[in-house]
Amino acid sequence: MTPRGAVSVRDALDGAVTAIGAGGSASPRLDAELLLADALGTTRERLHTDPDAPVRGAAVRAFQSHVRRRAVDREPVAYIVGHRAFRRLELAVDARVLVPRPETELLVELALALPARARVLDCCCGGGAIALALKDERPDLELCGSDVDADALAVAEANAARLGLEVAWRQADLLTGLPDAFDAIVANAPYVERATIPTLEPEISRHEPRHALDGGPSGLETLARLIEQASSTTVATLILEHGQGQEHKVAALCRAAGYTNVTHHRDLARTVRALSASR
Ligand SMILES: C[S@@+](CC[C@H](N)C(=O)[O-])C[C@H]1O[C@@H](n2cnc3c(N)ncnc32)[C@H](O)[C@@H]1O
């Protein structure tokens, strides 16, 4: 029984699922559960085990605000609750950084094969997802994360401090001004074709930092510059995320820069999403 004056977890969720679904989310139940768990300070699992538990007072108000932000403003759940799972880590995220994507975990998986104690740069690190996950899973690697944006680096540094993971952080426009001291670069650089950004889902086009998405008119400007810069350093291996359908162009850029050993990789959705190249 739910006490008088309170709404049950089940009813709160049902109402939110309807509102969030009507707002256009593709995953209204998952969103509602994550938002209610946050408002109650509990886990999704606990919501399932006790659907008659009451929701009242401050939790009701927090949940209503969360649902409005999700349903009406189309804000990503990760920004509303302030964190996102990536590999084995729970990372703090906010509107200063891109929400780490499941497909980017593929880059970490590929980088796990790097030689012992390799010096690795996570270029365009945002909130630090790749560098931090790699340091967590391969503590022998020497990790540096770099980004052009000081606000993104502040998120990355705070994540590293909270998780107790040792990564060096540098502010730089791609490799400009960084020491030539890396064996490998792992990068999820911006690769969205500029003109298509307004056509993306509002979660992305309205809320995520534009400079985290914008790969220039062709989508490939940033990756092309990074590959070209890397070719005049000691970097032997590139592990790069790219957009759907960009694999041949990115491979051609790598080969033209002297990275001849190119392999394409598919993400969990079977989309060709990353490329590794070495010389
Ligand atoms: C697609 S986000 C990726 C963030 C993070 N690596 C991830 O996978 O979640 C791209 C990042 O590249 C950064 N960036 C954009 N242009 C850059 C540049 N010229 N040099 C360095 N970083 C850049 C943005 O600030 C943003 O944090």
Image (spheres, helix red, strand yellow):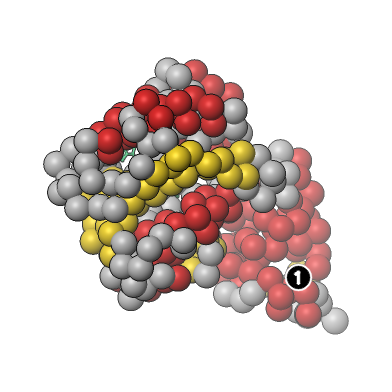
Name the one closer to the observer, 112 or 200: 112
Residue positioned 42% across, 35% down in the render: 260
Q: Which residue is drawn at 39% across and 44% down?
A: 278
Quadrant of the rendering where the N terminus is positioned: bottom right
Amino acid type of the residue tagged 1 in the rendering: Val
Question: Residue at point 22% right, 41% down?
Answer: 233
In the image shown, does 20 or 151 lie closer to the viewer? 151
Q: Position of residue 159 (x, y in %)?
A: 36, 65
* Residue at x 28% of width, y 59% of height: 119
Residue 252, placed above or below residue 103 = above
Residue bearing mark 1: 9
Residue 86 spot, x, y in % from top left: 52, 61
Give the secondary structure at mark 1: helix
> Can residue 209 be seen?
no
Quadrant showing the C terminus: top left
Whether label 1 lies within 8 Å of ligand 1 gets the answer: no
Depicted 123 relative to depicted 1: above or below: above
Which residue is at the front of the view, 233 or 135? Answer: 233
Q: Could you tell me residue 127's position as x and y percent?
A: 38, 54
In percent of width and height, residue 62 lies at 57, 62
Total numbered labels = 1
Q: Is residue 187 left or right of residue 174?
A: right
- Mark 1: few/some/many CA within 10 Å (<14, 14-19, 20+): many
- Where ligand 1 lies, by quadrant? top left
Viewer can see residue 267: yes
Please state which of residues 185 and 174 is positioned toward the viewer in this rendering. Answer: 185
Above or below residue 277? Residue 145 is: below
Q: In this view, does 122 lie to the left or right of 204?
A: left
